[in-house]
Image (tube, helix red, strand yellow):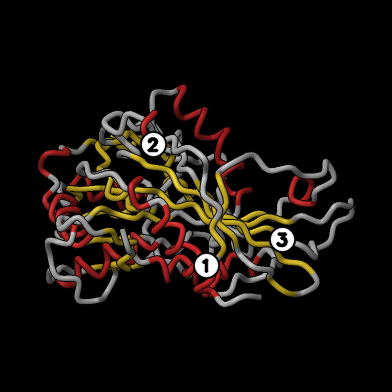
């Protein structure tokens, strides 16, 4: 394989950028001019390339279509206040990507392909990074099995790709959540802590049912007792009870280890707040709400960033919150935004600067 600094770039003949209204971006609808592609076969990775964004061809027997070996990540690049560009904590996404690969018995992607490939792609596409507040360039690394045969077994070949999409806010308003007690997202020993496509496919029907009831998303509970909170459909979740931030523990292996979740915890601790990572039951939330100590609920995720929750519906009991009064969510989001925009110190080196 060639040196990572020599990634071949084939430019698109025409940019689509002028065709897009950046003041009206729907999430995940528009894509930049180029994509990164790398193939794995015979136990080794081939040379990554950046090529014009285009459809890909595959055989009808391709393994991922039949057996679901597919993983992905979500990352964001931001236009900073001084006009430069930077990616938020991508090395953590690489680590999680390869943990997902291990769980799905897929080839791991070397750091130089993932990181240098992403940086080079962002340098090529730097003009696509929005300047508007709360906007970003969403980066989607993904990998899927490409063996052309039927039979339940790990593929021997994989394709790794990165595509990018300029985006605005994922949620335009605070959320109403339905506490799910019938369907499950993940079970102990399953793939809940892997970012694999099947997890999201399995969530579509329960989410559709919740939306028919007037809710935006579901709040998953554990698969055994439907008692303990896990995560939302698109993000991890935090609750403020008695001034403490509480978020479900990752120990069960059924919750995705969110990069934004970890960032919220670190920022909150820097602020001097007490953060608890532990099991928390819906009954505990309901009791705290009745006592008046449960004051805030919000989600945290790369796509969603910090999303306020204004309602939790549990059985026939409704817990409502004033989104304007959520001091913790507001302050944490402001600090994270300032770091991403380059107007606040970045003591942990979360922002990876790229040319352009």
Name the element at disc 2: helix
Against 227, residue 257 (above or below) is: below
Name the element at disc 3: strand
Residue ID at (71%, 51%): 68
Q: Mark 1 points at which residue?
A: 114
* The furthest residue to the front: 13
Local crowd at mark 2 within 10 Å, few (<14), some, or many (≥20)?
some
Q: Which of marks 1 and 2 is in front?
A: 2
Q: Which of marks 1 and 2 is nearer the N terminus?
A: 2
Q: Name the residue under label 2.
A: 17
Tell me where residue 118 appears, x and y as whole percent.
46, 62
Q: Which of 284 and 91 is in front in this view?
A: 91
Local crowd at mark 1 within 10 Å, few (<14), some, or many (≥20)?
many
Real-space Cα separation, disc 1 to disc 2, in angstroms:
25 Å
Q: How many marks?
A: 3
Real-space Cα separation, disc 1 to disc 3, in angstroms:
14 Å
Tell me where residue 124 appears, x and y as whole percent.
42, 55
Q: Earlier in the sequence, mark 1 or mark 3?
A: 1
Residue 49 visible (yes or no): yes
Quarter of the image holding residue 122? bottom left
Q: Name the residue under label 3.
A: 158
Q: Which of 344 and 122 is in front in this view?
A: 122
Residue ID at (89%, 55%): 151
Q: Which of marks 2 and 3 is in front?
A: 2
Left or right of residue 63, residue 209 in this image: left
Quarter of the image holding residue 87? bottom left
């Amino acid at each position: 394989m060639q040196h990572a600094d020599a990634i071949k770039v084939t430019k698109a003949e025409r940019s689509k950028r002028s065709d897009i209204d950046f003041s009206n971006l729907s999430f995940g609808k528009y894509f930049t001019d180029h994509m990164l592609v790398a193939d794995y076969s015979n136990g080794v990775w081939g040379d990554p390339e950046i090529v014009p964004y285009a459809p890909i061809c595959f055989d009808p027997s391709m393994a991922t279509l039949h057996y679901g070996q597919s993983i992905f990540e979500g990352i964001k690049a931001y236009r900073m206040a001084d006009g430069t560009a930077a990616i938020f904590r991508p090395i953590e996404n690489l680590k999680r990507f390869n943990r997902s690969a291990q769980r799905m018995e897929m080839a791991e992607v070397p750091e130089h392909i993932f990181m240098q490939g992403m940086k080079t792609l962002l340098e090529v596409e730097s003009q696509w990074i929005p300047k508007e507040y709360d906007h970003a360039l969403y980066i989607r690394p993904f990998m899927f099995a490409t063996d052309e045969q039927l039979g339940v077994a790990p593929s021997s070949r994989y394709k790794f790709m990165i595509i990018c999409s300029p985006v605005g806010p994922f949620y335009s308003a605070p959320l109403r959540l339905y506490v799910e007690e019938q369907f499950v997202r993940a079970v102990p020993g399953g793939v809940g802590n892997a970012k694999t496509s099947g997890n999201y496919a399995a969530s579509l029907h329960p989410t559709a049912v919740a939306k028919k009831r007037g809710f935006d998303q579901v709040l998953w509970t554990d698969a055994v007792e439907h008692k303990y909170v896990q995560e939302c459909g698109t993000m991890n979740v935090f609750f403020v009870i008695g001034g403490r931030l509480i978020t479900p523990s990752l120990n069960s292996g059924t919750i995705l280890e969110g990069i934004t979740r970890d960032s919220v915890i670190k920022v909150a601790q820097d602020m001097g707040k007490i953060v608890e990572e532990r099991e928390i039951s819906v009954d505990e939330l309901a009791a705290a709400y009745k006592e008046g100590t449960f004051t805030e609920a919000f989600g945290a995720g790369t796509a969603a960033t910090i999303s306020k929750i204004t309602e939790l519906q549990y059985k026939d009991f409704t817990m409502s919150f004033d989104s304007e009064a959520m001091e913790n969510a507001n302050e944490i989001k402001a600090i994270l935004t300032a770091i991403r925009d380059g107007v606040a110190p970045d003591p942990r080196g979360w922002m990876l600067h790229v040319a352009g």
